[in-house]
Image (tube, rainbow, N blue to C red):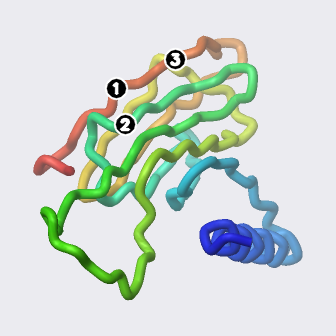
Amino acid sequence: MARKELEEWIYISGADLRAGAEELRGRPVKRARGRGWTPHVDVLETEKRIWIIVELAGVAIDQIGIFYSQDRHSVTIRGIREQEALLQGERAVYHQLEIEYGEFAREIALPDSPIDPSQVRATYRQGLLTVMIAKTEPERAIYVRRTLTVRSSGPKST
């Protein structure tokens, strides 16, 4: 098994164990599905909103895409974290490699609450992407496929 495959297996196994422990405590956990490297995600729900917070340190704002799928009642966040050329022609021996680069895609299942996709807002600041989704009454729910533009809040994030 290649090193990256082993690390992914260990990470997924740990996440499954944590989720199982939460379920045993009576707190069911919705799992997010991903491909490539996997950013960490928090999903919170209040009376009026669903919040998704994604850790995307080092991802440029113009490399992030957010997509809502009515069929799956989920939000998919896609992007790419590019590795900067630090060495400019120098040879190097890596002693530790923990930061993952390249493409990512993360699908987050939303709680079973009706939402209004026209009232979705996203901000990106200091490496955290925050997506706010307004909830609505079931009879007023509007379900459409939508792509969202991310806006920076505060100092420019890179």
**Circle 3/circle 2 CB separation < 8 Å:** no
Q: What residue lies at 33% left-to-right and 60% top-to-bottom?
A: 57
**Circle 3/circle 1 CB separation < 8 Å:** no
Name the residue nearer the viewer: 22 or 71: 71
Q: Which mark is residue 122?
A: 2
Q: Within the image, what quadrant is residue 80 found in?
A: top left
Secondary element under disc 3, as helix, strand or loop, is strand
Mark 1–mark 2 distance (CA, rounded to whole Å): 8 Å
- Nearest-to-viewer mark from 1 and 2: 1
Residue 102, x across and y down, in percent: 43, 50
Q: Residues within 10 Å of mark 3 (few under 14, many from 20)?
A: some
Secondary element under disc 1, as helix, strand or loop, is loop
Residue 80 is left or right of residue 16, and the answer is left
Q: What residue lies at 57% left-to-right and 30% top-to-bottom?
A: 135
| Residue at which label 3 appears | 146
Q: Amino acid at mark 2?
A: Ala
Residue 25 is left or right of residue 5, and the answer is right
Q: What residue lies at 62% left-to-right and 74% top-to-bottom?
A: 3
- Of the image marks 1 and 2, the number of the one nearer the N terminus: 2
Q: Amino acid at mark 3?
A: Arg
Q: Residues within 10 Å of mark 1 (few under 14, many from 20)?
A: some
- Of the image marks 3 and 2, the number of the one nearer the N terminus: 2
Q: Residues within 10 Å of mark 2 (few under 14, many from 20)?
A: some
Residue 140, x across and y down, in percent: 63, 13
Q: Is residue 97 above or below residue 51?
A: below
Q: Amino acid at mark 1?
A: Thr
**Circle 1/circle 2 CB separation < 8 Å:** yes
Name the residue nearer the viewer: 51 or 62: 62
Q: Is residue 113 above or below residue 57?
A: above
Q: Is residue 39 above or below residue 132?
A: below
